[in-house]
Amino acid sequence: MLAERVDHALGLSGCCPARTRESTVLSVVSLLITEGGGSNAPDFSVQRSALQQRSKNMKRALAFVFLVCASACSLYAQAGNTTAVDTTVCAVLANPKSFNGKIVRIQGTVVAGFDQFIIKGENCGQPVNAIWLSYPPGTKGKAGPIALLQLQAAHNFAGKLPAVTRTPVTLDRDKEFKRFDSLLAQPHKKGGGMCLGCFQNAVSATLTGRLDGVADAALQRNAAGKIVGLGGFGNMNAYPERLVLQSVTDVTAKPEDYSTSDVITRHDPKPSNNSNNNSNSPACSAVSICEASRSTGSATSNGAITSGNLASAPGPVAAVQRATAAMGSDPGALTAQRDAAVYGKPGEKNGVNVAFGTPNEVQPSEDTRSAQDSPDGVLYNCTFNMEQMKGELPEALLHVGQEIYDLRTATANEILPLNTLENNAWVVTVAVAVRDGMRSFTLPGGYLFYTAKWPAAEHESKMEAALSSFLSNEEMLSK
């Protein structure tokens, strides 16, 4: 009875859920009983002062509970406003800006690869048929790309940087998430040759999180060719949409099919890792880029983006530059030298930053202008996950180097689709690997890109078909 009277007096009916009102009212009743406790025997000498004190205590209690309930109702209302919107990958891709800032729930297939961490979209008819996936800052998850290039406005950025406010997301790190993260981080170990960024599983799941979207992820350039708009999210800022994960359910492993490439490459030597690599390895040529796999220098795995491009990686970058310089002067060697040169010389602040870690989280600095200058007003922040590489850092550095070269040398009217950028980078990567003694090269998802067992006359056609299929079906890119 007392609970009902307090409930009515506070006006809780219709504000908070029944369970919230019930717990609040019971707290009031408990407080009042405590305040009114003591002997049942009347003491007429102190009755008036006791009643006055009890009245004051009741007023204080009611005022306190009113504030508590108001806060509870406000929080409940906010939670109601962030109810997830059920949608599909294709619906988001069709109009990403309309979903910007919303909490969405999407069922889809997630894949991690060399420079991708995406939710696939099937037959969506877009240039990029996938949503980039990121964990909130501080997650410390294992899954994600093993290399990532992100563009950031330098201090001397020529464009206007829009003010961006994003609601923080808290990830539910429950058993489902841990299983999801673990399945995606499991490397593919069978087969031989080089398999760069190859993971054993894709994962089907229902994902809930904050959707960040822009109308156009293409880099914007002014009449002089300078970048004045940084596009969207993910690798090379090329994805118009990003889902910042809040929770994941319905996790099901979908093993990638490496069976064909495993059989063909099973006797081919794999890249040597840092601990046992040497220039006499079957996978290394006489003038070898394998030196870079041993020269890890002061590289760390903290994932921090550093200022000064070689401050965190003097060993591997310098070793790649020395190795490519010794290749000669044929077109393939010149391309490799050019891509290695984008990282600059030790101590040179040329706008290209190298760091090591797992690049799967939202970077707090991504929407801000850096204090660091750059020749073209843009910072090219490269992160490499050494824990997922097996002597493949040289190829990874040159792959990203090719992407940086293409982005920096594009003209004012030249629009480079992600498909073209990735195609160019993979061609350079496999060429360097084969030149360095690898007898086969497999792309993530089991696409055999090269094997010395193919007839020489068929190399070009088979490689072109494999790369086209990979870009379309694994990286979800249209021409």
Image (cartoon, helix red, strand yellow):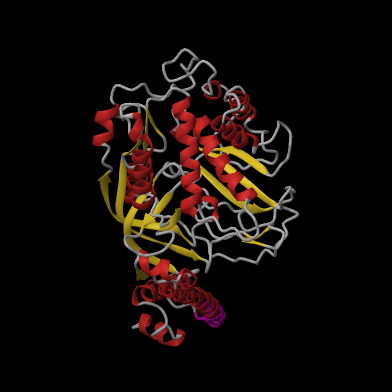
Spot the residue most to the top.
280
Decide whether the magenta segment is chiefly helix, strand or loop.
Answer: helix
Residue 439 screen position, x and y as percent: 37, 25
Depth order, front residue of 332/366: 332
Residue 453 screen position, x and y as percent: 31, 27
Question: Which quadrant is home to the C terminus?
Answer: bottom left
Asked if residue 94 shows in the view, the reply is: yes
Depth order, front residue of 219/54: 219
Tell me if residue 53 is in the magenta stretch: yes
Q: Is residue 136 above or below residue 20?
A: above
Residue 344 screen position, x and y as percent: 68, 36
Depth order, front residue of 127/34: 127
Identify the residue at horizontal 32%, vertical 45% (top origin): 179
Question: Which quadrant is home to the N terminus?
Answer: bottom left
Q: What stretch is highlighted in magenta?
A: 44-58
Identify the residue at horizontal 54%, vertical 32% (top origin): 332
In this rendering, the count of numbered labels is: 0
Q: Is residue 461 left or right of residue 357?
A: left
Tell me if residue 248 is in the magenta stretch: no
Q: Is residue 152 above or below residue 3?
A: above
Identify the residue at horizontal 64%, vertical 41% (top origin): 353
Q: In this view, does 436 lie to the left or right of 249?
A: right
Identify the residue at horizontal 33%, vertical 23% (top origin): 268
Residue 383 screen position, x and y as percent: 55, 41
Q: In this view, does 149 lie to the left or right of 435?
A: right
Asked if residue 139 shows in the view, the reply is: no
Spot the residue most to the front.
457
- Figure quadrant of residue 224: bottom right
- Figure quadrant of residue 163: bottom right
Q: Is residue 105 above or below residue 258?
A: below
